[in-house]
Amino acid sequence: MDYSEQVLAYGDDIVAASKKHPIVPLEKGQRYSYGTAGFRMKADLLEGIAFRVGVLAALRSRSLGGQAIGVMITASHNPAVDNGVKIVDPMGEMLEQEWERYATAFVNAGSDEEVVKIYKTLATDLKINVKDPAKVIFGRDTRPSGHTLVTALKAALVASQSEYVDYKILTTPQLHYLVRATNTEGSPVSYGKVSEVGYYEKLADAFIRAMKGKKFGGTLSVDCANGVGGPKLSEFLKYIPKDKVNGIDVKVVNDDVLRPEILNLDCGADFVKTKQRAPPIPKLVPGLRSCSLDGDADRLMYYWVDPDTSSFAMLDGDRISSLAASFIGDLLESAGLRDELRTGVVQTAYANGASTNYITQHLKLPVICTPTGVKHLHHVAQGFDIGVYFEANGHGTVLFSPYAIAAFKETEPQSPAQKDALATLAALGDLINQTVGDAISDMLLVEVILAHKNWTLRDWAMTYADLPNRLVRVEVGNKDVFRTTDAERRLLHPDGAQEEIDNEVKKFKDARSFARASGTENACRVYAEAATRSEASELADRVALIIQRYGTL
Ligand SMILES: CC(=O)N[C@H]1[C@@H](OP(=O)(O)O)O[C@H](CO)[C@@H](O)[C@@H]1O
Ligand SMILES: [Mg+2]
């Protein structure tokens, strides 16, 4: 077939519908761009973007034999006035990088007619039959602006002659689950029932299996950032009969989704991580095991106030990652699979140096550092049989290769201990979201580990001591001059900046510092670690000054 000759019968429909959902023009010289979090900004700029993303999602589905593509409408931990649109690929992964460029081109197209022109050009270049079937499934978080964006998205899917399913309100990881479940339905690698209920059933069943014979470690208080995680966690808990998990006691707090103005306000995982303290409401009771989800329930932070010392301890993504790696490593040992399955941990430069040391030296596992953004970590983690990846901010998961899953199920146990270890590993394979970081699933994982180890948060916090560190945001004239190498740990450009940073780092003990342009904000970030809090702070300030100077040259 000559793809350049094909007729796009619904081209006029796309143009007509597009006119009803216009793009807000940006100032001269500025462009919208599909970043780490898709398109994310003030919600009133997003209607036209949601429409064009819909057209692109239909084309993406056509390019992949009609497999379902996901679209999630959320702005995660951002304030309620923001929103965002993100595309999910067929196995539940983030959109392929090449298509991020196409998404950017669609959204920046100068007219409705040009959208159709790009659609046709891509169809020709990528040999996509525009008459092939397409399917797009979507969900949104609790933001009121989600309604308008869904209307625009649906209009795009109707105009592009794509089948669609509107799953209404979901957590981001639930949408990722549904995309994979849809595309594997009825196959030997079926990911689960294609419904929100299917998600709860799968997690509940796996959690009950993994907790067999263990006791839930006392009350757990879960701050849901007044976002979608609240109602979804409450719903999930209905699938755990009290007599199936000994002592289960989960208190859901900050779960008011009827007042959008309080979404992520002084609560949630991002608040805890950046402020390094507990949300003021509800007041944290000393000794209470607590955690926070973010606004779309894909990030997780644990914390508590030690009743003996009254000090606040936060257990972030690095801690969850090292906890999971240590537990899974022990299970593999008991299961006789430690040498059989390649296990590794993936982090970014923001991982605390103490966690990296603990994993490499104490757990004896390899650590790979990737650039910021979970898609990079996810990709590298796929290279292991068991790949543990987390960003320090609490977003991450553990990936199991098909070989690992088969080993858990097919190894013949020679002892009761080996049998238990294999059963727990198999349960973890179902409990841990294989598509993307999932705060609810990760929280259940942490609870399983603490129950198996019979640990409090104090025991967990004592595994190693974090190096004092500081993260600073620096506004500069032009962040694009900062180009990095070595997984963002060194600056390539502007000339001279890295040498100056190196000179400052040298003056401090056990110190490390790096600077990079943020992928989600119009600013640079400076990170510094050193032997003491005041030195880390001093170093961060000095490097920030260097960045400020080079950013305004
Ligand atoms: C230091 C930091 O926390 N950076 C965050 C932030 O990226 P920046 O590129 O640093 O703005 O947002 C990303 C998307 O949510 C997240 O993946 C990442 O970890
Ligand atoms: Mg999030």
Image (cartoon, grey):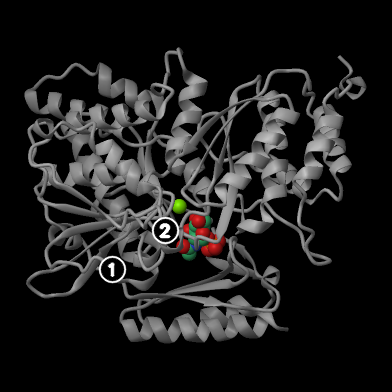
Q: Quadrant of residue 522?
A: bottom right
State the residue lying farthest toward the front: 258
Q: Position of residue 496 (x, y in %)?
A: 66, 79
Residue visible at 46% across and 29% down? Answer: 178
Q: Disc 2 marks which amino acid?
A: Arg
Q: Nearer the viewer, residue 246 or 145?
A: 145
Q: Position of residue 51 (x, y in %)?
A: 70, 42
Q: Is residue 260 above or below residue 27?
A: above
Q: Disc 1 marks which amino acid?
A: Asp
Under circle 1, the secondary element is loop
Q: Quadrant of the N terminus?
A: top right
Between marks 1 and 2 in the image, the one whose residue lies nearer the viewer:
2
Using the image, tell me which numbered label, if any, was put on residue 146: none
Q: Position of residue 463 (x, y in %)?
A: 19, 59
Q: Is residue 133 above or below residue 173?
A: above
Left or right position of 292 against 458: right
Q: Quadrant of residue 63?
A: top right
Q: Nearer the viewer, residue 102 or 73?
A: 73
Task: State whether label 1 is within 8 Å of ligand 1.
Answer: no
Using the image, tell me which numbered label, if any, was put on residue 259: 2
> Can residue 357 be seen in the rendering of this structure?
yes
Using the image, tell me which numbered label, if any, was put on residue 466: 1
Q: CA distance from mark 1 to mark 2?
A: 37 Å
Q: Which badge, 1 or 2, is on the more N-terminal residue?
A: 2
Residue visible at 25% across and 40% down? Answer: 328
Q: Position of residue 392 (x, y in %)?
A: 39, 59
Under circle 2, the secondary element is loop
State the residue lying farthest toward the right: 5
Left or right position of 4 against 137: right
